[in-house]
């Protein structure tokens, strides 16, 4: 995560050559900007595995869905690994889609009822995307319609290493919400 000033982007792009993977930070309020796109392109040209963190969900105008769309527009294949619980001042935690649990300052617990349907839908989309990254998992998914958490983790690792997926985590670095997952 280099500062937004273009003077630092070249240093960030050079540093990517020494790394095994990268975490691309995208604004949840503004989406992928020019600097985000440059860093994405450099990582993609290097065939580097990339994870993304949609930061600032505690800010006004934060929109996790729009942040995902902005990543897709720059050529990434983003897939949500968690959903935000609330937005702006009401952002209190995330729903971990692998474990299907809520993670808040109070700890882990049940997914809020208001997000249960969205979590199931996002989990189904995640399972499908992960299954498409591995032939064995795809076969198992087509037979059973589901993958367990261990299969999901294996598939995610394979998909990220092959640069087929960009897992995206929502959160707020300033308030340390969503950082743990």
Image (tube, rainbow, N blue to C red):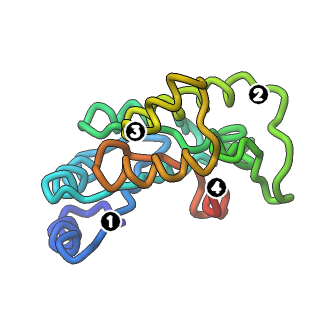
Mark 3 / mark 4, whichever is N-terminal: 3
Q: Which quadrant holds residue 81? A: top right
Disc 4 marks which residue? Answer: 178
Q: Give the Cα distance between marks 1 and 3.
A: 16 Å
Identify whether 135 is placed above or below 145: below
Q: Give the Cα distance between marks 2 and 4.
A: 18 Å
Mark 3 / mark 2, whichever is N-terminal: 3
Q: Which numbered circle lies on residue 78?
A: 3
* Residue at image coords 29%, 40%: 76
Name the spot of residue 37 as percent of width and height, x first.
23, 47
Image quadrant containing the C terminus: bottom right
Mark 2 / mark 4, whichever is N-terminal: 2
Q: Which numbered circle lies on residue 116?
A: 2
Q: Secondary structure at mark 1?
A: loop
Mark 2 burial class by Cα count in 10 Å: few <14, some 14-19, many 20+: some
Is 113 left or right of 21, judged from the image as shown?
right
Is 3 left or right of 95, judged from the image as shown?
left
Name the spot of residue 47 as percent of width and height, x first.
19, 56
């Amino acid at each position: 995560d280099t500062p937004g000033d273009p003077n630092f982007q070249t240093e960030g792009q050079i540093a990517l050559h020494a790394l095994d993977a990268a975490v691309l930070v995208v604004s949840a309020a503004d989406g992928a900007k020019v600097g985000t796109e440059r860093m994405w392109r450099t990582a993609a040209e290097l065939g580097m595995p990339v994870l993304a963190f949609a930061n600032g969900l505690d800010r006004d105008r934060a929109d996790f869905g729009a942040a995902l769309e902005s990543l897709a527009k720059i050529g990434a294949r983003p897939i949500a690994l968690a959903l935000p619980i609330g937005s702006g001042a009401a952002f209190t935690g995330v729903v971990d889609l692998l474990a299907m649990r809520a993670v808040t300052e109070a700890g882990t617990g049940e997914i809020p009822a208001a997000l249960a349907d969205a979590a199931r839908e996002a989990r189904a989309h995640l399972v499908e995307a992960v299954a498409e990254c591995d032939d064995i998992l795809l076969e198992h998914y087509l037979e059973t319609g589901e993958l367990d958490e261990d299969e999901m983790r294996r598939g995610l690792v394979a998909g990220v290493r092959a640069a087929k997926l960009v897992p995206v985590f929502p959160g707020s670095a300033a308030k340390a919400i969503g950082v743990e997952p």
